[in-house]
Image (cartoon, helix red, strand yellow):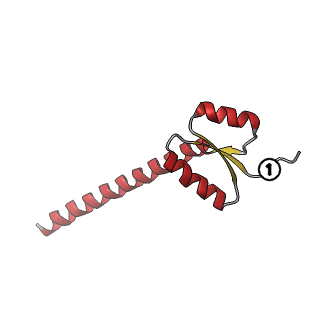
Amino acid sequence: MNKPANIVLLIEDESKIRRFLRAGFELRGFSVLEAENADEGLKAATFNTPEVSADQIQPVVLATLKAAFAQIENTAGMIRKLEEQRSAVAA
C-alpha cells in the first residue's frame, strides 16, 4: 500500500479558519486531514501518518507576529522621540 505524499493534519476548532487553511494547503498540493479538536486529531493521526500538523505551525506564526508587533512598537517609539526633538528644536 502506497503512502500518500504531503499529508497535513489540520486541527482547528473554528470551521471557517479550517476551511480557509485547508484550501491553502490543497492549493499547494497537500492532502489535508481535518479535525475539530485534539481528540479527533489523535484519531486521525492513528489511522494516517501526517507529515506535519498545522498546530505545529501556530507557535511559529505567533512568534513571528510578536516579533513584528515588537518592531512596530520600537518604530513608533522612535517616531515619537523624533517628533519630540523636532518640537524642541522648533520651539
Classify 10 Å Cα crowding around label 1: few (below 14), some (14-19), many (20 and above). few
The C terminus lies in quadrant: bottom left
Q: Outermost residue toward the left?
A: 91
Q: Compared with residue 48, is residue 80 higher up or lower down, i.e. above or below?
A: below
**Residue 76: where, in percent of width, then height?**
31, 57
**x and y percentages locating residue 6 in the rendered image:** 74, 52
Q: Residue at x 60, y 53 (%)?
A: 22
Query: What residue sits right under mark 1 in the picture?
Result: 4
Give the position of the N terminus as an image quadrant: top right
Dot 1: element? loop
Q: Which residue is depicted at the point 59% across and 46% down?
A: 57
Depicted 56 relative to depicted 67: above or below: above
Q: In the figure, 11 relative to 43: above or below?
A: below
Give the residue at the far right of this rendering: 1
Q: Amino acid at mark 1?
A: Pro
Point out residue 67 in the picture as x, y percentages from the top left corner: 46, 50
Q: How many marks?
A: 1
Closest to the observer, 86 or 35:
35
Q: Nearer the viewer, residue 4 or 66?
A: 4
The residue furthest top is 39
The percent coordinates of residue 88 (x first, y second) are: 16, 63
